[in-house]
Structure formats: C-alpha cells, structure tokens
Amino acid sequence: MLEVAVGYDIYERTGSKLLLGYVGLTQFLPMLAMTLPAGHVADSYERRKVIMTMQSVMMLASLGLFLIAHNHGSVGWIFLCLTISGIARTFLWSSTASFLPLLVSREEFPRALTWFTGAFQFSAVTGPAVGGTLYDLTHGASTVYLANTIMGALCVTLFSFVRVAHKPTEKQNVSMESLLGGFRFVFQNRIILGTITLDLFAVLFGGATTLLPVYAKDILRVGSLGNGLLRAALPAGSLACSAFLASRPPLRHAGRALLWAVVAFGVATIVFGLSRSFGLSLAMLFIAGFADNVSVIVRHTLVQLLTPDAMRGRVSSVNNLFIGTSNELGGFESGAVAQWTSTVFSVVTGGIASILVVAGVAWIWPEIPKFGRLVQPEKD
C-alpha cells in the first residue's frame, strides 16, 4: 500500500519521472550504508527483538508520511521518511531472513520458504489493489499512509506472540573481520554468488515497477486505480508461483529452471513495455512476477541451507544488499533512463538486458545450469 501511494503521490504532485527514480535511490543508499551493521546485529543479538524494534520504526515512518500528506508538507519530508524506513528495513530483512530457518527443520525449509514467500506475495497483491482503491476514493495518499501505520502496529502485536527465540552462541565484537564475514562467505561459494548476481543484474535492468505510475497515468490512461492493479499484477504472479511450487516436490533441475525463469521475465518485460492494452499489460506483469518468484525461492533456499546459523545474519545481509541494489537502484536506473530517453525505451531495453545477463551468468558460472534438486541433506 505504501509503495503504490508514494509513487503515485510524488508523480501526481511533481510530474517528474526522475523523482520516481529517486524514490528507489532514497531506499537503496541507507541499505548500502547499513548492510554490514545489520548483519552483525542479526548474528549478535536476539533476532525476534530486532524484528519488532525495526517494524516499530517503519510504523512511525508511515505515521510521518500521513502527517506530511495531511498537512500538505513538501516532497522533501517524504524522502526523509523513506530514508528512515529504508534504514529500519535493512535491519528487519537481515534478522527476518535468518530467523525463519530456526522455525523448521532443514528438510522442511524449502517448502516453508515457499509458503513464507506466498504469504508475503498475497499481501503484495492485496496491498497495491487496496492502496490504489483508497487513493482513488479519497483523492489522496493520506488515508493509505494511515492504513499502513495501523497495519504496522498490528504486525508488531502479532509478532509479539512468537515464542521461538534466537540465542546467539557468542556475541561478537564489532570488527572489520566480523562485518565482512558475510561477503567472504558469499564470494567463496560460487553457487550462491552466481545466483544472487543473476538476480541482481536481471532485475536491475529489467524492473518496470518504478515506471508503473507513468504507464497508468500517461500511456494506458487508467488512473490511480489502474496503477494499483498494475502494481498488484507482479505479486499476483509470484503468489501463483508459490502456490504451484508448494504443491510439488522440490525442483529437480533448479539451475535450469532459474535461468529459463529469468529469460521469461525479460520477455514479459519487453512485451509489457510495448503494450498499449491494459489487459495485455496486466498479463505480462503477472508472467514476470511468476518467473521472478522462481528466482526468489531458489536463491533464498540456497543461501539459507548452505550457510551456518552463526553467519546467517551477515550472509542474509549481503543477499539483501543484492536484492536492494536490483530493486531500489534499478528503480533509479529506470527513472533516469526514462527521463533522458523515453519510458518505453527504458523498459524494453531493460528486458533485453535481462536476457543477455542470463547468457553471461551461464557462461561465467557453468555449475548453475547443472545444479539439480533444491534440497540439502542434514550435516552431521
């Protein structure tokens, strides 16, 4: 709800595609600065408490956005709230990703992760649709920001009932050796490095999400409600993918499935960029979301199963940095290219680049297409 409201609010108030790109940059820079401390905190402190604290900070940032919108504050204050939210989200992601493996066994983890991402994608489907509807009915973003604040408070309340606690084996002193441990582990594991690099560059070039307000307002002419539906189409595809994979055994040829999924993501992005039909655009975003979720499940499963618990926070932090780079910095890239050239050119060339990235990754990391079943045996 927050993402769809912020993008449309800023574009409606300023008409600037470049400012849409700055939304992604504003969330990426705090992530870049906080990645190493966030990983250290997730491995050195009780993850449940970190999650609740950071979710509370994000709730307060949403409350700030509501006050800005209600009092017609300047756009600059919006970016300040997004910066605070970006810092909190960096710590939240590292602790959440490394907390999930504590809840289930290693054998159950791939399917648990599928349900976990499915639940997230369900909220990502309903959130933009509800956010777009609220924005359209109330002719502004303040109601959406208030609703997001209430949902944040509910999240903190529900998480307080989780009784599983993470007890760090040893609280580590802050040092460059400790902070950089996650990077060293990732760069020493070629499978993990290759899969997260593929996701990084594919989404960095191929993400069209940042420019959806432009398509909704100027190209497809479907308004704020249509913007919410377009935003919901991607996670709807991801949700369908989660439901499909949850009903099947773990992927038997995970590497090949990953590469073909990114190719499908690139093709769908190209067709979306050229489309002038609202129905076709929704369908292409749905396909792109379905394909992207294959990458998400494969990557997260590998990262968590191949990483010892004592390092999960720092490795998850590195993984989140790659994700943030692809999503947030990719949003800036899309907005900047659209400002300097055209919206359609930005999206179509991004989809082409995603397909080229697949060829490059398969050549540099030939072990990825050879990777088989998405299950790791329990270590003795």
Image (tube, helix red, strand yellow):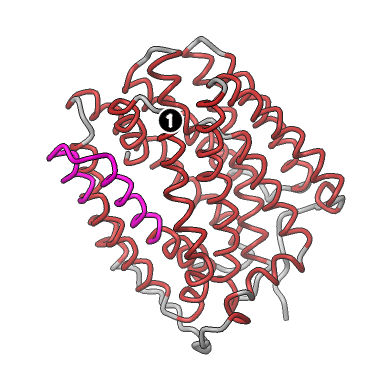
Please give left or right for residue 63 compared with residue 277 in the image: left
Main SS class of the magenta portion in the image = helix
Measuring from the top left, give residue 293's x and y in whole percent: 59, 42
Please give left or right for residue 143 compared with residue 105 in the image: left
The quarter holding residue 45 reads bottom left
Outermost residue toward the front?
A: 340
Q: Which residue appears at 29% of the width and 56% of the height?
A: 155
Question: What residue sits right under mark 1 in the picture?
Answer: 231
Vertical position of residue 165 compared to residue 26: above or below:
below
Question: Does the magenta run of residues contain 81?
Answer: yes
Q: Nearer the viewer, residue 218 or 40?
A: 218
Q: Nearer the viewer, residue 37 or 276?
A: 37
The quarter holding residue 355 reads top right
Measuring from the top left, give residue 298's x and y in whole percent: 66, 51
Q: Which residue appears at 81% of the width and 52% of the height?
A: 371
Question: Does the magenta run of residues contain 217?
Answer: no
Please give left or right for residue 257 compared with residue 326 in the image: right
Q: The residue under label 1 is which amino acid type?
A: Arg
Q: Which residue appears at 64% of the width and 42% of the height?
A: 294
What's drawn in magenta, residue-wise?
A: 63-87
Q: Which residue appears at 29% of the width and 61% of the height?
A: 57
Vertical position of residue 143 compared to residue 111: above or below:
above
Please give left or right for residue 220 compared with residue 329 in the image: left
Measuring from the top left, give residue 121's x and y in whole percent: 46, 42
